[in-house]
Image (tube, grey):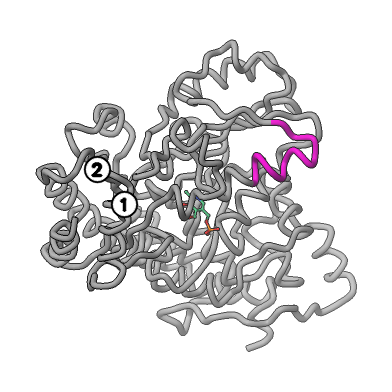
Amino acid sequence: MKKKITATASKSVTKSVTKPKNKTAAMHTPSIRTFNVHGSHNTQSWEFSNHLVPPMTASTTFRLQSLQRGAEGFQLFADPQNYANPIWIYDRLEEPSSKMLEEQLAKMECGEVAVSFSSGMGAISASFLAFLKTGDHILSHKTLYGCTYSLITSWLPRFGITHSLVDVNDVTAKDLKNKKVKVVYFESVANPSLQIIDIDRIATLVKQENKTRTEENQIKIIVDNTFATPWGLRPLEHGAHIVIQSLTKNIAGFGTEMGGALITSKKFLTALLMIRKDVGAIMHPHSAWNIMIYGIPSQVLRFEAQQRNALLISQYLEKNKLVEKVSYPGLKSFPQFDLAKKLLKSPNGEFAPGTMLTFILKGSTTKTETFINHIAKNGYSITLAVSLGLIKTLIEVPGLMTHAAVPKADQEKSGIPAKLIRLSVGIEDPADIIADLEQAFKKI
Ligand SMILES: Cc1ncc(COP(=O)(O)O)c(C=O)c1O
């Protein structure tokens, strides 16, 4: 068994095992929905001859047959030419379970490669460390997940990396002329405002500006696609350079695993593997395996069920007289409904407005507090908890919880009004979710 784990051994086994499957694949390319269930048949990461489900790997270090092979492993590490057939050395460099997961994530996001991390924040930090240095400037959207906001505004300045927080939909060609700007950063669907960024527009501007810059000084568009998920939007197809997923959310889906990933083209692979090796924010193989075996194969089913519920609940809230405002990209009243229809699409071309919605209650903040506390104490289908995209419906108040790092004085202009309630809709019977809301409405 031990022998099969090495690159050479798995190579010889895989050859004989996967040939007929490759033949089938050549005749018919499966859709992404099917690929998510079966993964790569011809991966070099393990042999598939005896397993319906790939085995879970756990070894932190790997047997090397000779010193020459050990040296070769270090020499070839992070070489894109060697991407499909790595020499396993040590978990922090690369290991089979997360490698198989990465192959699937790359396909889902329409990228060439993916690099996994221990959390979404691990992935975001690595993308900044890899592509920014002292003196550089990050042009970021003003509404960001709270920890991303604090990473950009509290930590990056300590390394001489400056930032501006703007509405990326208003960025002009002139804004990109500042040669210090090296990264344009945003969430495709912003957390929590749900504002959608017109990726095509910003990508056209960046492409134009990059024509005037050397390879080393190119601006990179880094997009956090966690809210949309790859089923709802694939930013690389729209001109983004690097995509982030917090796998902790809809991709893992059940609230049991943490993880993050950067999905991109081969030309950025070396930098990302190198930074992960040295920073060490690697995903545990156990988490990688769970996400690969349970999360990804069920993601589309869960996403579609959650999305159906999200539309029903947002329509229910829209009719409720105690509600001041509801935001859901699938509602005609959503201010960017046309942009949502243009960008948020499944690989089949169906409208995919997602699983997240927000609402604001009429009246004082005390009413909001009473409403939320009632759900926290009495709700069955809805839980007061952070995180999102899970099978269980979660409610929270971003200004006081996930986005507490954004100073109170800046929250309103950052798209986080104090009374904003965020609902991550799960797969429960929608009538039960509504019943919990209904009970809480009776208390205010
Ligand atoms: C949009 C977005 N990006 C990134 C993250 C960070 O992910 P993680 O919690 O896996 O580090 C979160 C967490 O809530 C998020 O909402």
Task: Report the Cα–Cα distance between label 2 and label 1.
Answer: 8 Å
Location of the C terminus (image quadrant): bottom left
Q: Residue at x 57, y 61 (%)?
A: 119
Spot occupied by residue 22 in the image (x, y as percentages of width and height): 44, 62
Name the residue that disc number 2 marks: 363
Furthest residue toward top: 174
CB under 8 Å between discs 2 and 1: yes
Q: Which residues are magenta?
A: 151-162
Amino acid at the residue labelled 1: Thr
Q: Residue at x 56, y 41 (%)?
A: 407
* Foreground of the two, 44 or 121: 121
* Foreground of the two, 2 or 164: 164
Spot occupied by residue 141 in the image (x, y as percentages of width and height): 52, 32
Q: Residue at x 69, y 72 (%)?
A: 8
Dot 1 alpha-carbon crowd within 10 angstroms: few under 14, some 14 to 19, many 20 or more: few
Q: Which mark is residue 286?
A: none
Q: Is residue 276 left or right of residue 349?
A: right
* Foreground of the two, 441 or 327: 441
Q: Which mark is residue 366?
A: 1
Q: Is residue 370 left or right of residue 240?
A: left
Spot occupied by residue 89 in the image (x, y as percentages of width and height): 76, 71
Location of the N terminus (image quadrant): bottom right
Q: Residue at x 57, y 50 (%)?
A: 147
Q: Secondary structure at mark 2?
A: loop
- For ligand 1, tell me if the residue under mark 1 lies within 8 Å: no
